[in-house]
Image (cartoon, rainbow, N blue to C red):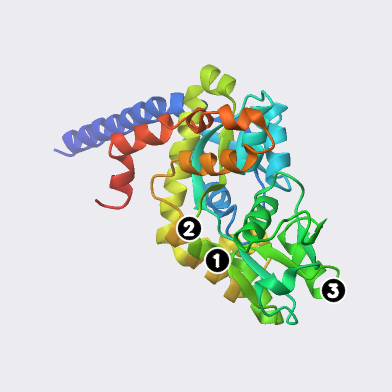
């Protein structure tokens, strides 16, 4: 009997070893298929680029077979330029930069959008009480073609002012640089996103215009690549968007861990602006992150008066929705949220 028990144990051990081997070799092709890829984010603000950060730190790139190096490239224009130069095959950017690049013949297309309205607030020094007080004042903006620059011009136009004639716009840089310039009195007003608004209010700079409340269709931030890369490596694009969509779910449903990741990358220890930024983005980032065709139409209409190509362009050509649509049609996105 003892001999039989020993023999059975040996059989069981052998079977378990064989099963483990089969599992390993079945998984090996996928494990070995992890593709090295450089990707980029464009803003150190707490939540603007948070989905990329979450995708990296929650190891969702790895889960979907990508060995991603995440690189910070300041500003949406530079992000788009990196894609055009082939330095970054897939990365973040803003709608104005993509629009300008495509109108100039550049091979770049939007494959996802995470904030599809203008999420900006115009804030100013305390002496400025109402929109009319902005006339003749100095406004802090970002480089031409960025979303912040576009947003500031749209805000001024909404108030009936000419961005060229009625105010003096000065290029300062990113959101943090603009807030520092406002605090030092270098500029009298600027535009900020949700986290910047909380910071501005804490420092005593009132909000003059709430552009977010207007919900103007706009491709504030999204994921971009080239049509060539889609043609040559659709498998990588597909994995990337799958990981990105799963990161949106993580961001929306795991608040504390997402805030920790946001604080890590933004280097903001003050929880209040980070949490307010999370609240705003968790509400506005769509579960199915389609790039907004209507948002590109907004930009083209604004450019049409000075660029004849913009008047003739079709906003639908700026977007390739197939990868998000595949995930929606397959039920993958609904399954994440238990629907």
Residue at horizontal 53%, vertical 31%? Answer: 318
In the picture, measured across the screen, residue 207 lies left or right of residue 216, that is: right
Q: Nearer the viewer, mark 2 or mark 1?
A: 2
Residue ID for mark 3: 184
Q: Label 1, on which residue? A: 277
User: Crowdedness of circle 2 by 10 Å Cα count: few (<14), some, many (20+)?
Assistant: few
Q: Quadrant of residue 77?
A: top right
Q: Quarter of the image containing the N terminus?
A: top left
| Residue to which mark 2 is pinned | 215
Residue that appears at 22% across and 32% down: 7
What secondary structure is marked by label 2? loop
At 67% across and 48% down in the image, what residue appears?
42
Say if residue 251 shows up in the picture.
no
Measured as percent of width and height from the top left, residue 299 is found at 58, 42
Q: Residue 80, position in %: x, y?
A: 67, 36
Compared with residue 115, is residue 140 higher up or lower down, i.e. above or below?
below
């Amino acid at each position: 009997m003892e001999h039989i028990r020993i023999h059975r144990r040996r059989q069981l051990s052998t079977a378990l070893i064989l099963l483990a081997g089969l599992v390993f070799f079945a998984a090996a092709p996928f494990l070995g298929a992890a593709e090295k890829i450089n990707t980029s984010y464009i803003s150190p603000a707490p939540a603007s680029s948070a989905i990329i950060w979450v995708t990296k730190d929650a190891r969702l790139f790895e889960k979907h077979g990508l060995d991603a190096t995440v690189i910070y490239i300041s500003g949406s224009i530079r992000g788009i330029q990196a894609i055009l130069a082939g330095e970054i095959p897939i990365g973040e950017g803003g709608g104005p930069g993509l629009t300008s690049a495509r109108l100039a013949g550049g091979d770049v297309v939007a494959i996802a959008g995470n904030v599809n309205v203008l999420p900006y607030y115009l804030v100013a020094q305390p002496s400025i009480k109402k929109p009319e007080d902005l006339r003749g004042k100095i406004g802090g903006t970002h480089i031409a073609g960025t979303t912040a620059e576009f947003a500031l011009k749209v805000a001024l136009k909404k108030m009936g002012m000419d961005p060229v004639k009625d105010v003096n716009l000065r290029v300062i840089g990113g959101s943090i640089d603009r807030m520092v310039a406002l605090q030092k009195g270098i500029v009298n007003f600027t535009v900020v996103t949700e986290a910047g608004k909380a910071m501005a209010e804490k420092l005593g700079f009132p909000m003059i215009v709430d552009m977010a409340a207007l919900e103007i269709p706009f491709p504030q931030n999204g994921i971009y690549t080239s049509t060539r890369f889609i043609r040559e490596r659709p498998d990588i694009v597909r994995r990337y968007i799958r990981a990105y969509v799963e990161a949106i779910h993580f961001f929306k449903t795991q608040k504390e861990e997402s805030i920790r990741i946001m604080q890590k990358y933004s280097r903001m220890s003050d929880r209040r602006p980070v949490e307010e930024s999370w609240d705003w983005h968790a509400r506005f980032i769509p579960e199915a992150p389609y790039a907004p065709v209507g948002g590109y139409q907004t930009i083209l209409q604004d450019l049409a008066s000075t660029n004849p190509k913009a008047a003739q362009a079709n906003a639908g050509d700026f977007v390739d929705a197939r990868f998000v649509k595949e995930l929606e049609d397959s039920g993958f996105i609904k399954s994440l949220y238990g629907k």
